[in-house]
Image (cartoon, rainbow, N blue to C red):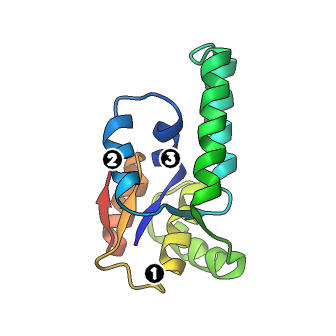
Amino acid sequence: MRYWDASAIVPLCVQEDSSARLRALAGAEPIVTWCSSIVEVKSAIEQRARDGSLKPDAREKALAGLRELAEAWTEVAAIGPVRERALRLLAVHALRAAAAVQLAAALVVTEDRPTGHSFVSSEGRLRAAAQREGFVVVG
């Protein structure tokens, strides 16, 4: 199983230095992500549009790509178990709330047995925490 944090999904929608590498990863295995990742990714797209780094036509293309990805990915939606794990993760790792929830969702989907499973993220602290929890970190 390969879990994708929202930060790693953004380059699948918007051109970044890591886009080609992450697109190759996305083609290898289905994407599994938290049910609110779509909100985080849309936020990143809209922020780029507001600051002018994403032109209107590129924004539309990015949003269409996000919709296509979201239709195909598997979402973790177990709110109670994810919240429980996120609270523990916040005490153990220097993470923001959204990052703790992403890592918690990955733990839920692996039934707290992350060994041998991949965690894809572009966020440094989250990558480090996922590795300490036992995931193989890629991205």
Secondary structure beneath label 1: loop
Q: CA distance from mark 3 to mark 1?
A: 20 Å
Mark 3 or 1, nearer chain start? 3
Residue kind at label 1, given as amino acid type: Thr
Give coordinates of residue 90: x percent, y percent: 54, 67
Question: Which residue is at a point 33% across and 70% down the rendered structure image?
Answer: 135
Which residue position holds label 2? Answer: 24
Residue 23, image x, y percentages: 39, 44
Q: Residue shown at 60%/73% (left/top)? A: 87
Asked whether 119 or 29 is in front, the reply is 29
Which element carries disc 3, helix, strand or loop?
Answer: helix
Q: Residues within 10 Å of mark 3 (few under 14, many from 20)?
A: many
Q: Residue at x 45, y 28 (%)?
A: 15
**Residue 97 seen anywhere in this rendered image of the structure:** no
Tell which circle, 2 or 1, labels the residue nearer the N-terminal end.
2
- Which numbered mark, 3 or 2, is in the foreground of this view? 2
Residue 116 spot, x, y in % from top left? 28, 77
| Count of numbered badges drawn on the protein | 3
Quick one: label 2, few (<14), some, or many (20+) residues within 10 Å? few
Q: Is residue 95 above or below residue 85?
A: above
> Which numbered disc, 3 or 2, marks the residue that appears first in the sequence?
3
Amino acid type indicated by mark 3 = Ile
Q: Nearer the viewer, residue 91 or 112?
A: 112
What distance separates the C-alpha of mark 2 from that of mark 1? 23 Å
- Disc assigned to residue 9: 3
Q: Which residue is mark 1?
A: 110
- Give the spatial CA distance, label 3 vs label 2: 12 Å
Residues under numbered marks 3 and 2 in contact, where contact means CB atoms less than 8 Å apart: no
Which amino acid lies under the numbered mark 2 shown in the image of this protein? Ala
Q: Residue at horizontal 34%, vertical 36%?
A: 20
